[in-house]
Image (spheres, rainbow, N blue to C red):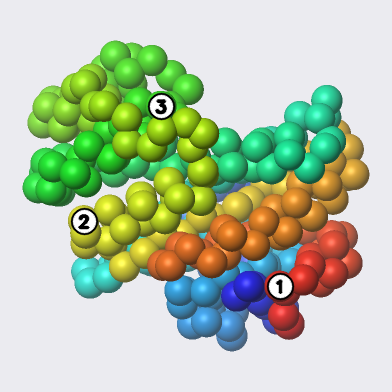
Amino acid sequence: MPMMQSPQFSFSYCWDALHAEQEQPWLIDAFVRPDVYGQLVEMRSWIVLGNSGSGKTALRYALKSEVERRVSDPIFVIGWQPTFDCNVSDQISVYQQITEGILRAFAVSIVEWVASTPERFIALSAPARWLLGWFCQHWLNQGPEFVVLAMTERYGAHAQPALRCLLLDSYPEVYRAPVRALDVLAELTRALQRAGFDGVWLVVDDFERISQDNPEHVSVLLGYLLGTLGLFEIDRFCIKMMVSACHRDIVLSSRGTCQ
C-alpha cells in the first residue's frame, strides 16, 4: 500500500486562539511549504502527523488550492471529515461507515464540480454522464430539487441545465445490488480522468473533532481505514490524511505504512 509518513513541517506564523478552518482567506498567504511538499503533491498516498495547531489544515488548504488550479493535469479533490457512530464497533459495520462516508463526500464534490464547470460535464460522453448522474442520485443526502436550487443560487443560472441533467434526469442502474464500493470508486475515477483530471485525491482531516468525544473512536476508525487496503490500490486514486501525532503508533503499525 503506497502510504507514507511525512517528515516534520513548519510554518512562518503561529496562532493560539484562531481556528485554521475559519481563516481561509489569509491562511494560504501565511503558509510556508515544508521540504517534502513536492512529494506530497505527487500521485501517492500520504499520512501527515502533527500536533493540534501545527498546521495540518493549512497544509490541506494549500495542497487542494494548488492541484485544483493546475492548467494541465488538475486533480479532482474530495474533502472528507469522517464521523463515527459509537453504537457500532464490528468490522463490517465500521467498514460500511467508512465507505458510505467516502461515497457521500464524493457525490458532494461531483455536484460542486458540475455546478462550477457545467460545460465540462455536458461535454462528457453519455456513459460518463450516466455514471455520475446515477451515482449522485444514489449517494447525496439532500433532495435533488433542493440541491439544484441551492447550487444554482450559488453558482448562477448557467449551471442549472447541467445540474438538472445530473440530478433530475432518469438514469437506470449502473451497478446491481450489492454494490461494491471499491468498484464504484474506481469507475468514477476513470470517468473523471476522461473529463481531464489526472486523478482523484481523497483528503481526510478533522480527526480531532472525533477525539474530543472519545479518542478510542479515532483509534478504531483509523485502524479500519488503514486496513482497507483496496482503497489504496485503485489506479489514480490516492488518500492524503491529516492525523494528530497522538495516533502515531496506530498509523505506524498499519501493514502498508512506510516512513
The answer to whether 139 appears left or right of 167 in the picture is right
Label 2 crowd bin: few (<14), some (14–19), many (20+), radius 10 Å = some
Mark nearer the viewer, 2 or 3: 3
Can residue 101 be seen in the rendering of this structure? Answer: yes
Report x, y in % for residue 64: 44, 59
Question: Does residue 71 lie above or below 34 as drawn?
Answer: above
Q: Name the residue under label 3.
A: 138
Q: Which of marks 1 and 2 is in front?
A: 1
Q: Which of marks 2 and 3 is nearer the N terminus?
A: 3
Given residues 221 and 177, the one toward you in this image is 177
Count of number-bearing discs: 3
Q: Mark 1 points at which residue?
A: 256
In the structure shown, which secondary structural element does the residue marked by tag 3 occupy? Answer: helix
Q: Which of marks 3 and 1 is nearer the N terminus?
A: 3
Residue 168 or residue 203, whichever sits in front: 168
In the depicted structure, whether residue 72 falls above or below residue 100: below
Q: Are marks 2 and 3 in contact (CB under 8 Å)?
A: no
Q: Looking at the picture, does residue 135 appear above or below residue 240?
A: above
Residue situated furthest bottom in the rendering: 35
Using the numbered discs, state the Cα–Cα distance from disc 3 to disc 1 in whole angstroms: 32 Å
Q: Tell me which amino acid carries mark 2.
A: Ala
Provide the secondary structure element on which disc 1 rests. loop
Q: Where is residue 251 in the image (x, y as percent from the top left)?
A: 79, 65
Residue at mark 1 to residue at mark 2: CA–CA distance = 31 Å
Q: Quickly name the residue at label 2.
A: 195
Question: 30 or 83, which is in the foreground?
Answer: 83
Q: Do the residues labelled 3 and 1 touch (CB within 8 Å)?
A: no
SS class of the residue under badge 2? loop
Q: How far apart are marks 2 and 3 (CA)?
A: 21 Å
